[in-house]
Image (spheres, helix red, strand yellow):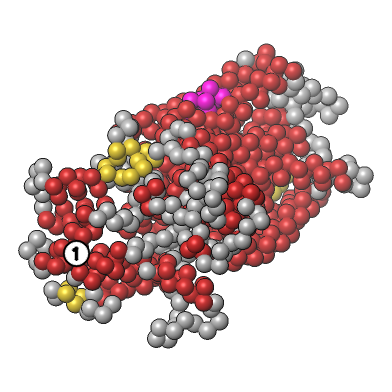
């Protein structure tokens, strides 16, 4: 900036903030004088230049706020009013609120007071009664505490149940190990897959708040069905004597099986819907156009993950102990109760929320682009992207909707080529550049999404086969206490409970100093670190399983029967190594995915895009079931156990080879991820308004 000082206020800080904005938006380019760097294409330089123009605008506003007083230079004051009275967007409501704070209470009923009242309203948001939401009374940090409470209670119930369900399926419902593992992974996979449905509904039909409430009610109904079956033994399959090695256990079937699956999948529908709506609902409480509030989004997602770990810790300890020692009926009853209490917490904050107004179906908008592009497949795309059709700013519901043109997937640009047949008609005949870019964003996300699926497959093993390993090992802790095998997951969870706040409060600010990124490191870097750690976790799991089997062979305990015989003389804490490494992996990848899909998605489809995180988990669990079935079939005739993972006896199986298989696949998948993450182009938001130039000249 050419002006170094105004009214004694230095602009040096303003210049530094401008550099931070450029770095944050990947627009910081080293160059000499005003020449473009060698090796950069002219069109790339022009695009970066256009995107960078919004950074000085933001900094000029902050500088204006810093020196503004009612009796100061008239032209500067007029410049400020120019922003107010010409409906210039991009943080206007933030500027106006700062102006009110500096000047004191404005004259009631004055024209300027009415104007400021108008821009205190948040476009695209309403309160619980359907009235326009106001920045001063809705949203912010106070609103997300209710979301945090629900997240803790929901994960207490859900994680505490799924971590131990394999035991319930095998010991009560008489399923074999592989079938029990597949039943669990299919259930969890369906739960996360249904988050796509929940995200779709909250984006285009119901608000995210209403979607969450209805989903929670369905989830409670599912737990109640499971409670009834677990309480009434007549709804169980015939129980058998597991001490008799020749006994044939009849697994659950018929109406009893139907009741089990009705309960499970009511929980799946409800939990999937609430997960898809609650995470973006909390992020909606912060305004991305307000520089101060925008920085809270990263903190929110870190704290959301912290709440997930706190709830999960309580689930795998307290709830698992109740299930094992007090009965599954009491366990399901507590799950229903805590989820109901979580719903009450959400309802208590209803008057303080910002509720985003549902818009057009995101799938419809994407489909329109492909349909119109196909119709216009014979047309030529103009060489100048500015010749493509773009909607008028007044048509945009949110300023963050307006996206700049990118060069990828040029075929889709044909949907924005104006024709005589398309003028004045619906989006099934002509799409705007912004709508085309929304479709491109979703397409660009798909390789990133696919690259994270295998990590979820690795996670599935920690909730199935690793639990079964723990059942065979020495779980004593002192003379009178025995750790339930599913509670081993508490090892990484306790570590994450301690590390997540440290990461958010200390590591992120430190990394921000070096990277200039609001989150310390980019979302894609965070995901990549998690993928590497998941591969290491599977390698550790394979080594531990080799040692466990060797101990069983040395002690002649290959035919060990859990519960009925003494455990293998090897501490269950050996399994803590793989849990610990994968826990760190989850800290990076889970939060990175939530932030990536939320921040990159168009504003009108953020619930749907955020649910890609849970859909990735879903695909991972389904892939685990596929791997188990295929590997058992492929190795049936070459192993004495009739398959690597066949039957009840884990000591006769080859779980170690399955872990090595996943470790090698994870390494290959990481290199696949590196390729796609370097190819990915971030969302190009247009933050530049030509009218800024005119207003600067007026000063």
Give, as a single range, the part of the protein colored magenta: 216-223
Taking the view exactly as shown, the residue that stands out farthest to the bottom is 32
Counting the numbered discs, the total is: 1
Relative depth, front residue between 73 and 348: 73
> Which quadrant is the C terminus positioned in?
bottom left
Residue visible at 49% across and 52% down in the picture: 432
Can residue 696 be seen by looking at this rendering? yes
Q: Residue 30 sits in which quadrant?
A: bottom left
Query: Percent position (x, y) of residue 607?
Result: 49, 43
Judge left or right: residue 544 versus residue 437.
right
Residue 552 to residue 19: above or below: above
Q: Which residue is mark 1?
A: 79
Residue visible at 13% across and 47% down in the picture: 111
Query: Percent position (x, y) of residue 638?
Result: 92, 48
Relative depth, front residue between 450 and 5: 5
Taking the view exactly as shown, the residue that stands out farthest to the top is 234
Relative depth, front residue between 6 and 323: 6
Residue visible at 54% across and 77% down in the picture: 41
């Amino acid at each position: 900036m050419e002006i170094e000082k105004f009214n004694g206020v230095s602009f040096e800080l303003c210049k530094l903030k401008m550099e931070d904005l450029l770095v944050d938006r990947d627009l910081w380019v080293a160059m000499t004088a005003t020449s473009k760097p060698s090796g950069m294409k002219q069109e790339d330089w022009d695009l970066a230049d256009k995107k960078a123009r919004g950074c000085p605008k933001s900094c000029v506003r902050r500088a204006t706020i810093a020196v503004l007083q009612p009796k100061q230079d008239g032209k500067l004051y007029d410049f400020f009013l120019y922003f107010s009275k010409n409906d210039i967007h991009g943080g206007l409501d933030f500027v106006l609120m700062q102006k009110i704070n500096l000047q004191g209470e404005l004259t009631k009923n004055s024209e300027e007071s009415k104007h400021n009242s108008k821009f205190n309203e948040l476009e695209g948001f309403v309160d619980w009664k359907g009235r326009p939401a106001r920045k001063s009374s809705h949203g912010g940090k106070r609103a997300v505490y209710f979301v945090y409470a629900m997240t803790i209670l929901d994960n207490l119930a859900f994680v505490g149940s799924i971590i131990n369900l394999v035991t319930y399926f095998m010991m009560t419902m008489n399923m074999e190990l592989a079938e029990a593992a597949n039943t669990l992974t299919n259930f969890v996979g369906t739960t996360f897959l249904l988050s796509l449905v929940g995200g779709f509904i909250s984006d285009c039909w119901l608000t995210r708040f209403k979607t969450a409430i209805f989903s929670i009610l369905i989830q409670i109904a599912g737990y109640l069905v499971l409670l009834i079956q677990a309480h009434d033994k007549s709804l169980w399959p015939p129980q058998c004597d597991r001490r008799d090695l020749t006994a044939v256990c009849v697994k659950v079937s018929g109406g009893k099986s139907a009741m089990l699956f009705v309960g499970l999948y009511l929980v799946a529908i409800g939990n999937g819907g609430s997960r898809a709506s609650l995470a973006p609902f909390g992020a909606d409480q912060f305004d991305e156009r307000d520089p101060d509030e925008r920085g809270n989004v990263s903190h929110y997602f870190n704290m959301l993950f912290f709440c997930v770990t706190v709830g999960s810790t309580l689930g795998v300890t307290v709830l698992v102990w109740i299930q094992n020692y007090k009965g599954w009926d009491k366990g399901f009853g507590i799950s229903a109760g805590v989820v109901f209490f979580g719903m009450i917490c959400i309802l208590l904050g209803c008057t303080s929320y910002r509720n985003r107004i549902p818009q057009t179906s995101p799938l419809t908008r994407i489909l329109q682009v492909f349909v119109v592009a196909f119709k216009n497949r014979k047309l030529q795309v103009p060489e100048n992207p500015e010749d493509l059709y773009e909607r008028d700013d007044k048509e945009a519901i949110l300023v963050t909707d307006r996206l700049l043109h990118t060069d990828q997937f040029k075929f889709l640009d044909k949907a924005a080529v104006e024709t005589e047949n398309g003028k004045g008609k619906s989006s099934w005949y002509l799409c705007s550049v912004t709508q085309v870019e929304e479709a491109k964003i979703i397409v660009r996300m798909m390789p990133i999404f696919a690259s994270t699926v295998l990590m979820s497959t690795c996670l599935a093993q920690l909730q199935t086969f690793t639990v079964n390993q723990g059942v065979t090992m020495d779980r004593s802790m002192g003379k009178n206490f025995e750790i339930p095998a599913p509670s081993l997951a508490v090892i990484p969870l306790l570590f994450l409970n301690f590390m997540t706040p440290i990461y958010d409060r200390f590591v992120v600010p430190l990394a921000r100093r070096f990277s200039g990124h609001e989150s310390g490191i980019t979302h894609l870097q965070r995901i990549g670190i998690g993928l590497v750690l998941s591969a290491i976790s599977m390698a550790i799991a394979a080594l531990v399983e080799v040692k466990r089997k060797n101990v069983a062979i040395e002690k002649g305990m290959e035919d060990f029967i859990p519960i009925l015989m003494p455990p293998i003389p090897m501490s269950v804490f050996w399994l803590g190594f793989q849990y610990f490494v994968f826990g760190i992996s989850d800290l990076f990848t889970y939060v990175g995915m939530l932030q990536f899909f939320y921040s990159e998605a168009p504003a009108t489809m953020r619930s749907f895009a955020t649910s890609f995180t849970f859909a990735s988990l879903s695909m991972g669990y389904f892939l685990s079931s596929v791997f188990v079935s295929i590997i058992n079939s492929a190795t049936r005739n070459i192993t004495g156990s009739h398959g690597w993972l066949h039957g009840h006896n884990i000591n006769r199986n080859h779980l170690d080879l399955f872990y090595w298989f996943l470790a090698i696949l994870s390494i290959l998948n990481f290199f696949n991820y590196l390729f796609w993450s370097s190819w990915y182009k971030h969302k190009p938001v247009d933050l530049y308004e030509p009218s800024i130039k005119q207003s600067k000249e007026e000063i």
